[in-house]
Image: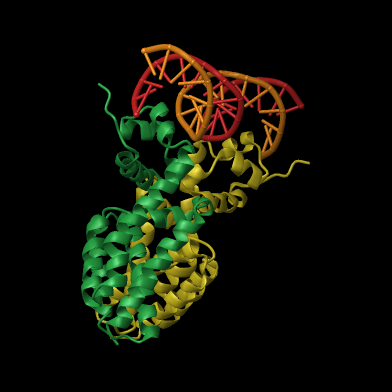
Chain colours: A yellow, B green, C orange, D red
DNA sequence: GTCTATACAGTGATAGAC
DNA sequence: GTCTATCACTGTATAGAC
């Protein structure tokens, strides 16, 4: 039986492999197992090999965040956008049970390979959140601080949740970070 | 010329390689280059190979933190211990220019290999800091929250500093986290 | 588009001379 | 204790049949 796949079907599967094993820890064999596609098929979809997969996976993550988090923060009513972000963050990171692929890529030399999309992801998140907080009435300096604290806190909580095996730290941290938005 | 090394001399060098490339991204060839030791010598010091190097490196990091951070927090005068922690953290992480090896190991499946030392490192840090805050007059629930926020914030700031290339986020975050210790 | 077969460099690890 | 030579294996990537 030959199942015909599209690139868009296989990218999310590859993303999970990268998320679990990291860029260097991910082998083509692992990707073959997880996707069910032979190497021929994989190189047909990704002529650039593993590096192209990495780029596409980062673009896929960025697109999800753009749709569910960045755009609601940038365009919509600020309070609703922030609430939407909170819900989406908890869903996406499975309440702390799933790490941030972009953050993980940032920590080792994988960052040098994908420096631009990695930087862009975090810069846009902080700026979108900061903008929403300004429109919600915070001063621009306070908004900047709160937005940075939030993104920093989410990343740190994901590290600690996985390091300690206690996912609850993620809920506690994000709850406090959200509460801090109310402070002037 | 044959330089005689000791295991204690070579462990910090290997630690830097793991820190830069991650556990999976680190190859024996890289370690050979950085340490100047041939494979024979390396396997003489580490019969367990790469995994033993990983364990020793984690133990080395933990020993540094125990001496410069955990013990001052646990044993000494609380305010002095917290100040000492702040100084040591800034020095160790080079003001955001150097990531946390333990946190990096925690993010991918490398965690499963070294779960115990990784968990112990973070648990001890949070508990030591929490204890110092209690002795400095905070309630036990507040102390717990502030300690968790601090360690989460340090880890998250290291991720963002490297992701954005802006190390200053580390100084800003740690400064705010330290200031929060004064709040009741 | 998918597969199998394969090239070939690099992997972690070992043996043995010095 | 250090080195070189070499192991068996896995890594990414390619070629070509179907």
Quarter of the picture holding the N terminus of chain A = top right
Q: What residue is shown at x 52% (from left), y 53% (from top)?
A: A19
Q: Is residue A167 visible?
A: yes
Q: Nearer the viewer, residue C18 or A61?
A: C18
Residue extending furthest right? A1
Location of residue C14 with respect to A92 vertically, above or below: above
Count of numbered marks: 0
Q: What residue is shown at x 30% (from left), y 33% (from top)?
A: B5
Residue B120, picture quadrant: bottom left
Location of residue B163 with respect to D3 vertically, above or below: below
Position of residue B91 in the picture relative to residue A168 (left or right): left
Q: Can residue A113 be seen in this view?
A: no
Q: What residue is shown at x 35% (from left), y 77% (from top)?
A: B131
Position of residue D15 in the picture relative to residue A53 (left or right): right
Location of residue B26 with respect to B149 vertically, above or below: above
* x and y, in percent, of residue A6 in the image: 63, 47
* x and y, in percent, of residue A50 in the image: 50, 40
Quarter of the picture holding the C terminus of chain A = bottom left
* x and y, in percent, of residue B69 in the image: 29, 64
* x and y, in percent, of residue D15 in the image: 59, 21
Residue B90, picture quadrant: bottom left
Q: Which of A128 and B140 is in front in this view?
A: B140
Q: Nearer the viewer, residue A99 or A14?
A: A99
Q: Nearer the viewer, residue B22 or A174?
A: B22
Position of residue A176 in the picture relative to residue B174 (left or right): right
């Amino acid at each position: 039986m030959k199942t015909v796949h599209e690139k868009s079907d296989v990218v999310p599967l590859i993303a999970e492999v990268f998320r679990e094993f990291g860029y260097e820890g991910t082998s083509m064999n692992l990707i073959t197992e997880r996707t069910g596609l032979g190497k021929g098929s994989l190189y047909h979809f990704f002529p650039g090999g593993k590096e192209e997969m990495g780029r596409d996976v980062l673009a896929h993550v960025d697109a999800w965040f753009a749709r569910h988090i960045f755009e609601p923060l940038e365009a919509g009513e600020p309070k609703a956008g922030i609430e939407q972000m909170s819900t989406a963050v908890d869903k996406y990171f499975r309440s702390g049970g799933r790490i941030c692929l972009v953050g993980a890529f940032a920590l080792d030399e994988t960052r040098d390979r994908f420096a631009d999309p990695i930087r862009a992801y975090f810069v846009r998140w902080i700026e979108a959140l900061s903008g929403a907080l300004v429109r919600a009435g915070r001063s621009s300096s306070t908004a900047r601080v709160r937005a940075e604290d939030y993104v920093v806190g989410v990343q740190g909580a994901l590290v600690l949740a996985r390091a300690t095996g206690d996912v609850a730290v993620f809920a506690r941290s994000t709850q406090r970070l959200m509460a801090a938005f109310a402070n002037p």
